[in-house]
Amino acid sequence: MTEVRRPAGGRAGADASGSSELAGRVASLLPELVHGLKQLVRIPSVASAGFPVEPLVEAHDLVAALLRGAGVERVDSLAIEGVRAPIVVGALPGPPGSPTVLLYTHYDVVPAGDAELWRTPPFEPVERDGAIHGRGVADSKANIMAIIGALRVFDGEPPVGIKVIVEGEEEVGGPFDGYPVTAPELFQADAMIIADVGSVRPGVPTLTTALRGSAQVEVAIRTLAGDKHSGSFGGAAPDARVALMQVLASLHDAAGDVAVPGLRREAWSGADYPEAEFRTLSEVADGVPLMGTGSLGERLWSGPAITVVGIDAPPTTAPINSVAGTAKATLNLRVHPGQPAAEAQAALVNHLRAQRPFGIGVEVTAGEVGDGYAAMLDGPGYQSAMLALQRAWGAAPQRAAMGGSIPLVMALHSAVPAAEKLLFGATDGYANIHAPNERVLLDELAKTVAAYAWFVKEYAQRVRRS
């Protein structure tokens, strides 16, 4: 067997038998984990087009080194055609007969955006008021360090087999999103922790158990061979943009609920946002009502949403006095986690094609689809995760969902359908991910390390008992 380099700090994890002992071990590791997190944040590992590849390679190499330092015996680099950022793949065997847990997250980040909106430079991590601030610190470099910390707790001898996958193009998508179905043996595991999420708010341990699916649809109207002067032709010549607005208005009822037949919607029974908190998080202007009816969880997670994500029109800064001969819009449909995205997309396409604004026909084109995901709520992985969150936070865990999809989760589910997928991590609803002044709370990071370690211990015991 390859000799495993033991990290400093003494052996504690595999023999720890109480939350106080495990919490103490995590506390002793935290300074080194914070140091590693700051190292990661200093690397501008943006995978978007036009950004250099060198920081991606640098981040990959640092993650690989951190994993080796945490006792992972085999650390390799996976290269996939069409993927610029190398993928870190690690494996650590467990005791004979033990289950295997796969840990996934990513090291790439979104661009920093307008530097003027940051209180401190985005790639110079700053520790302030119990938090670390910097681009990518919460999404998802803190989760990388939470994985490293949990492995460090066990000093290279976890009670389960471990697989680690850390990619570098999650934020932009690409060939890796569909790769698991082409190489399922690489991803074989009994349970998977998807460390790319967090809690609804600080101090509230949260397990994400559902992801909405997604579908794109393009709707276009053509009425004239070309635009015409509004003074000479307006009033009789059919304006394609006005017709398109009529079509778009048909997508919602007067209360703001989606009005397309055939889209699944159900009550949500997990954690929910109070309206005041949601208004703060979404920065709704004073006096503006929210869209739709029912609980916020139902509107955000277990019901559909349709958003106009693109529309062809002159900007108000450069208006043109003409009747539009053509108009086009791109729609994004978010789909109930349990409804096939293609089925929901077909319902939206049928609704749009049935519209005849002013008697004018509508052209509709179906785009990409991605199914949602609904977790099993009765398996040993789910039970272990809920107990781990309870122990780590000392508070009752909540179930939540995400309105957005994570394409890799669906690919992992297709590749290894029997594995339970558990989504929890170190960020929270106030972390400003993808926004200026992103931050992660050190307390949430420490609790996530403990939760991952507790999950591994509890899952090993539950599977052994079964």
Image (cartoon, helix red, strand yellow):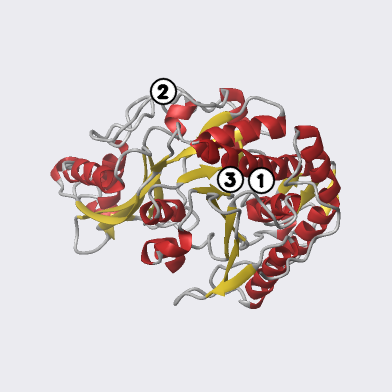
Tell me the quarter of the image containing the N terminus. Answer: bottom right
Q: Are marks 1 and 2 in contact (CB under 8 Å)?
A: no
In this view, the residue in front, 76 or 432, is 76
Question: Which residue sits at x=64%, y=42%?
Answer: 457
Closest to the observer, 50 or 180: 180
Q: Amino acid at mark 2?
A: Thr
Reading the image, the residue beneath label 2 is 293
Q: Is residue 300 left or right of residue 115?
A: left
Q: Position of residue 410 (x, y in %)?
A: 40, 51
Q: Nearer the viewer, mark 3 or mark 1?
A: 3
Q: Residues within 10 Å of mark 2 (few under 14, many from 20)?
A: few
In x, y percent, where is residue 44? Answer: 69, 67
User: Front-most of 124 and 189?
Assistant: 189
Q: CA distance from mark 3 to mark 2?
A: 27 Å
Pointers 3 and 2 in contact (CB under 8 A)? no
Label whose residue precedes the other's in the sequence (3 or 1): 3
Which residue was labeled with disc 1?
A: 432
Cα separation between marks 1 and 2: 27 Å
Q: Nearer the viewer, residue 429 or 327?
A: 429
Mark 3 is surrounded, within 10 Å at the Cα level, by few (under 14), some (14 to 19) or many (20 or more) other residues, namely many
Checking the image for residue 197, the label placed there is: 3
Q: Quadrant of residue 22?
A: top right
Q: Is residue 411 above or below residue 236?
A: below
Compared with residue 166, is residue 375 higher up or lower down, i.e. above or below? Answer: above
Q: Secondary structure at mark 3?
A: loop
